[in-house]
Amino acid sequence: MTRFVIAKHDEILRQLRLTSLEQIKNFQGELVKDHRGRRDILRIKVSALNSQPLVFFLKRNWRPYRKDGLKSLLRHGRVWSSARQEWENSKALEEAGLRAARLVAVGEHCALLWEQFSFLSTEAAEGGQTIEQFSATCRDREPRRQVIDGLAREIRHLHDAGLAAPDLFTRHIFVDTAGAAPKFCFIDMARLDRLKKLSHRQRARDLAALNITAALRWVSAKERLYFLKKYAGQIDRQFLKLIRRRFDRLARRRKFQDFFKNSEPKVK
């Protein structure tokens, strides 16, 4: 089964020759990341009518895992590609009053049991910097406090809406600090649990992922406790144990070892 949906910027996509799966496959652009040939991410810059450049990201899934296709078949009664799943997850975030990178187009080719190829195109996330980048570059106490405060409320909003993200990493949340209060935007939400009510374990899993992607050298222990108090209202020891248990499991993985480099930051 083949599926192709354009949500916005039809004319620009036609000009770029990005209106069919074959054109998507053949497109050459600025490579952002290549995941060992399984998928790649391209950045596309175009001129908009107001002379401000418009930035798209194109994520192409070349060799999807067959197990994911089988899981989607069991869940939905038919195969959903990873791109379509991320598309639907972004819509779920928006329906809950949260922001995700604005959807541009999605397409897939699925066989009977699993996905063959898919793509997702979005606009660049609003904000210009991730939480990871903000933590590393902003050393002023008050803006940091405002962002931590706002982020805690945003994640609580996410969870209270019955949404949980195992990939809730600091590099997957953009922050816009230009206004009176910080605004946040989620990206790469290919995995999103959608339930009526989240368990403490699911909440702890997400918070542990956020914690371990905020390196010790950029975020202090005091700031972490402040975030948790703003998120939970009060510190629950049992909840802390659940977060710590999940954190310890993540800490054994090589990809999270950046957390432990150097020491705690100095904040003005």
Image (cartoon, helix red, strand yellow):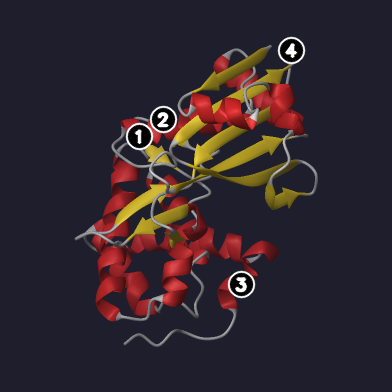
Circle 2: element type: helix
Q: Are marks 2 and 1 in contact (CB under 8 Å)?
A: yes
**What's the mark number on residue 258?**
3
Mark 4 sits on what residue?
112
Circle 4: element type: loop
Residue at image coords 38%, 63%: 240
Mark 1 sits on what residue?
94
Mark 2 sits on what residue?
91
**Quadrant containing the C terminus in the rendered view:** bottom left
Is residue 235 visible in the rendered image? The answer is no
- Report the label total: 4
The part of the image, by quadrant, that contains residue 252 is bottom right
| Mark 3 / mark 4, whichever is N-terminal | 4
- Measure the alpha-carbon separation of dots 2 and 4: 26 Å
Instruction: Give the number of the mark in front: 3 or 2.
Output: 2
| Residue 177 point in image, percent of width and height | 30, 62
The amino acid at mark 4 is Leu
Instruction: Give the number of the mark in front: 3 or 1.
Output: 1
The residue closer to the viewer here, 187 or 9, is 9
The amino acid at mark 3 is Asp
**155 left or right, relative to 87:** left
The amino acid at mark 1 is Glu
**253 left or right, relative to 49:** right
| Residue 175 point in image, percent of width and height | 37, 58
| Mark 3 / mark 2, whichever is N-terminal | 2
| Mark 1 / mark 4, whichever is N-terminal | 1
| Mark 2 / mark 4, whichever is N-terminal | 2
